[in-house]
Amino acid sequence: MLKSLKRGRSFYISLLSFMGPIIMQNIINSSAGFIDTMMVGSLGQDPVAALSIANTPFFIAMLVIFGLQSGGSVLISQYWGKRDISTINRVMGISWAFALSSSLLFATAMFFFPEKLMGLITNNAVLIDIAARYGKIVSFSQVLSAFVTIYIGARRSCESPRFGSYVMIASVLSNIVFNYIFIFGKLGAPVMGVEGAALGTALSRVVEVIITVSYILFGDRAKLLPIKIKFLLKPGKLIVKDFFRYSAPVMLNELLWSFGVSLYVVIYGHMAASGDIMAAFSLAGNIGRVITVVIFAVANTAAVFIGKEIGSGGTRREVFDLGRTFTVLAIISGLASGLLIIITLFSIIQPFVFPLIGLSESARRICTLMLLVDGIILVCRSFNTTIIVGLLRGGGDVNYSLFLDTGSIYLWAAPLAALCAFVFKLDILWVYIAVISEEPIKALFGFLRFKSANWISNVTRELN
């Protein structure tokens, strides 16, 4: 297995130079959620639980945008291998059109019907009220986030991930400052609590857009990805057709996957002691996202490197061997990240973080169990993420990735978790294990697909 890692020095220099900014971006982005949780946690356990509930619809909306970004990257990374900037602009134009329109629809629904949307997730009236107030303020910032996300994704697919790191640094720093001002009423501002956290998040999205537009107009001096309006606005029928062929399954994948994951949240939100469960789930999720940044960096890097290798004319054998290298890197990063979660749990989270947030004993127990299960299963999840997000999408095998990523949820994990929670009325530990049980199933089918090499496909065409 380790023989797959025997590649030239230039490969690892290129790998680290690409992964470094992505890891930094993921750390910053994940830390933002953790910092939000910590700052809101000073207000009590209910606001922390409500924040998790409020972010569930935004999680679905963002994954739709991520689906558009990832779907576009299937084409962009391969056209980048051909250095076809005009066609990359065409793909970006289509991605922006769908991302902005879908996020606008979502924002409108969240602004006018926040209580109804929150009521779908939990029956806890206190949490619904807090979550609805947060969601209404943040709602239209989703449109701004969609614009920035598509551009960052396009640059990443063109082997330029650093810009995204700069935007995220500015966003997180501004979010911390705005949160401090509006949550606690500093510098003459009123004390707004959870609504202050929402306002801080919305204003940080404005900062992201200002930086992105300024960079597009004045900052891209190397003209790595010049914006060509005529191709953005008139992508052409062939590219629209290709976009739907290769991007629609990815969008559907992310949409169905996000709904599936949200079903888990709905299950947690309707169990007994939902307040404790949601607070624990919110904290565990934020901790996990901070620690697993390398896993997602490996997967995102794999998608770009695989797509570029195919687009630049690499042989089937060369692409497969490159894919094998990334699967080994995924296993190693999964083992290391899982061990780090368990060590961090007992050395930092339990003695220091739990007291800061003020979780109840029940919530602490639940959070501990969730993090332990995550640490054990993480090697499996890392392998799956690299196979689905990296190899299958980078190789153009979007239909199988759709089947693999969603079938395990709807045909297995979600029904099993619902049975454990509402029919057998088992403890949250067993419900969470039922949720996590999708990972070994995905790993088996993902490994078989990878070994077949049927995931390798060139999706480019000559347009210029």
Image (cartoon, rainbow, N blue to C red):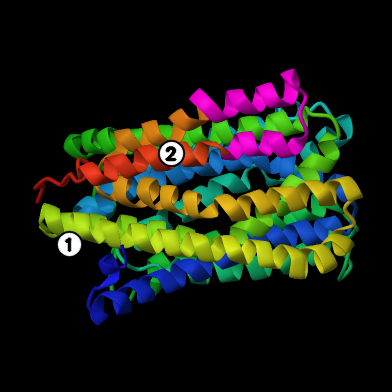
Say which element carries label 2.
helix
Q: Residues within 10 Å of mark 2 (few under 14, many from 20)?
A: many
Relative placement, left or right, of 201 versus 246 is right
Mark 2 vs mark 1: in front: 2
The residue depicted at 39 percent of the width and 53 percent of the height is 386
- Image location (x, y in percent) of residue 188: 89, 67
Q: Which residues are magenta?
A: 411-436
- Drawn side of residue 117 relative to residue 149, left or right: right
- Residue 158: percent from left, percent from top: 29, 63
**Observer-nearest residue: 315 or 155?**
315
Foreground residue among 278 and 113: 278
Q: Nearer the viewer, residue 213 or 362?
A: 362
Q: Is residue 220 left or right of residue 295?
A: left
Q: Quadrant for the N terminus, please.
A: bottom left
The foreground one among 367 and 141 is: 367
State the predominant SS element of the stretch in magenta: helix
Q: Give the residue drawn at x 56%, y 37%.
A: 437
Amino acid at pointer 1: Arg
Q: Which mark is residue 83?
A: 1
What residue did someone put label 2 on?
A: 442
Marks 2/1 in contact by CB < 8 Å: the verdict is no
For residue 352, which quarter of the picture?
bottom right
* Residue 93 painted magenta: no
The residue sitting at 51% across, 62% down in the picture is 335
Q: Is residue 282 left or right of residue 297?
A: right
Sequence-first tag of 2 and 1:
1
Amino acid type indicated by mark 2: Lys
Please provide percent x and percent y for residue 20.
44, 73
